[in-house]
Amino acid sequence: MTSHWDAIVIGAGPAGASAALPMARAGLSVLMIERRRRVGFPVQCAEYIPRILAGEVNAPEAAVAQRVGTLRTFIEGTLAAENEWPGVILNRVVFDRHLAERAVAAGATLWTNCAVSAVEDGAVLVGARRLTAGVIVGADGPLSITARSMDCAHTEFVYGLQVEAPLVAPMQHTEAHFRPEFLAGYGWMFPKGTWANVGVAVARPAAASLPRLLDAFLAGLRERGVVEPGATRARTGGLIPVGGAPARTMRGRRVLAGDAAGQTDPITGSGIPAAIQCGQAAGEAACNDLGAYEEEWRGLLEHSLNRALRHRRTQCAEWNQGSFERLIRRTWIAFPEYYHAQ
Ligand SMILES: Cc1cc2nc3c(=O)[nH]c(=O)nc-3n(C[C@H](O)[C@H](O)[C@H](O)COP(=O)(O)OP(=O)(O)OC[C@H]3O[C@@H](n4cnc5c(N)ncnc54)[C@H](O)[C@@H]3O)c2cc1C
């Protein structure tokens, strides 16, 4: 078995598969190493992407579960805004598999059920084997060991818990729910035909309460008559890095992309489009000038990421102080104040 590769990509999620594709197309020998047995499974995501970023994501029709038209924002149970917010709810198992298969079709090698246990500059350990590479792309998600190897592991997360719940009637909109008990986070309902992803994400001090918060949230949706009383399914959850990106996302021959790089939006928790854009930028830079990556992705995202980070800091500092509604109106994407802040 080959032990030296032009590029090793750790993680075959959206960031990793998007990084592998341009490198494989350019004729580099590329190895993607994925810990899971099946790419994309289990899903740890609410699967929403806004249509304005659909071009970057370029999802095949088979990976689209449903289209939506508007976003309704509720503050303490009251509808506070309805915005034109077209987007798609993905089927992420299909979507992630599509991205990985595309990279493999271009020539990348994929090892599944295989975890990288340590990362060095230009080498990774897989069990007792040491593999070397000209470039290592750390696309290994929120708890990235590549980031840890570069002394920039994430420390700030929100914690999410989600189920699929049966809908009383199909919906054409998404919902975001803000309540004081959803500490520096929110609840969501994203429809997928006759079911919806219903979840809650909160900051660490409230994480232990997530099962109770999600149950209460579901009970409220049933009371409103939008969710059926029947059983839920597909309980899942995960961490979302919300502390922003480290000062440097590359060091020597290691680069980070996606959640591993903290490119996830700290207010919405959205990270699929950024993972794809930045993964691709990392892969393209690796084919030409790796050093160009840092400037490239920051040019694409840093402005909106920094704005979201400032709003998150405000939420964390002021969550239980003053008017809750005013705070949400200043710090949530559905309100003009969000975009006015410097
Ligand atoms: C509850 C929840 C809801 C979310 N909802 C949305 C949403 O609606 N819209 C949105 O845009 N984003 C959402 N996100 C965020 C989104 O899921 C991530 O931003 C996105 O998956 C990032 O892609 P990635 O490729 O960087 O990381 P991941 O998708 O996490 O992929 C990383 C991969 O690396 C693998 N891996 C990790 N460590 C190793 C290792 N040591 N060796 C080998 N493989 C390894 C993992 O198994 C995984 O497959 C949500 C996240 C959560 C937790």
Image (cartoon, rainbow, N blue to C red):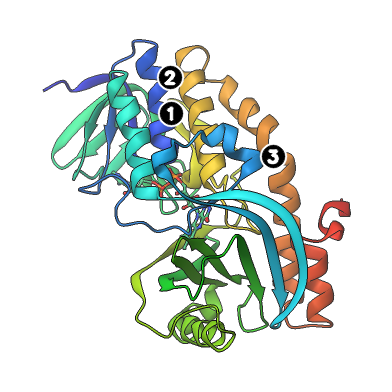
- 1 or 76, nearer to the observer: 76
Three-letter amino acid code at the position of disc 3: Glu
Q: Position of residue 216 (x, y in %)?
A: 51, 87
Q: Mark 2 and mark 1 in contact (Cβ < 8 Å)?
A: yes
Residue 92 appears anywhere in the view? yes
2 or 3: mark nearer the eye:
2
Q: Residue furthest front?
A: 169
- 236 or 205, nearer to the observer: 236
Which numbered disc, 1 or 3, marks the residue that appears first in the sequence? 1
Q: Is residue 141 left or right of residue 277?
A: left
Q: Position of residue 341 (x, y in %)?
A: 86, 54
The label on residue 302 is 3
Cα–Cα span, label 2 and label 3? 23 Å
Three-letter amino acid code at the position of disc 2: Pro
Query: Few, some or many C-alpha atoms within 10 Å of disc 2 (few <14, some 14-19, many ≥20)?
Result: many
Query: Few, some or many C-alpha atoms within 10 Å of disc 3 (few <14, some 14-19, many ≥20)?
Result: some
Q: Residue furthest left?
A: 1
Q: Position of residue 269 (x, y in %)?
A: 58, 57
Which residue appears at 56% of the width and 86% of the height?
220
The label on residue 22 is 2
Which residue appears at 51% of the width and 45% of the height?
272
Residue bearing mark 1? 19
Three-letter amino acid code at the position of disc 1: Ala
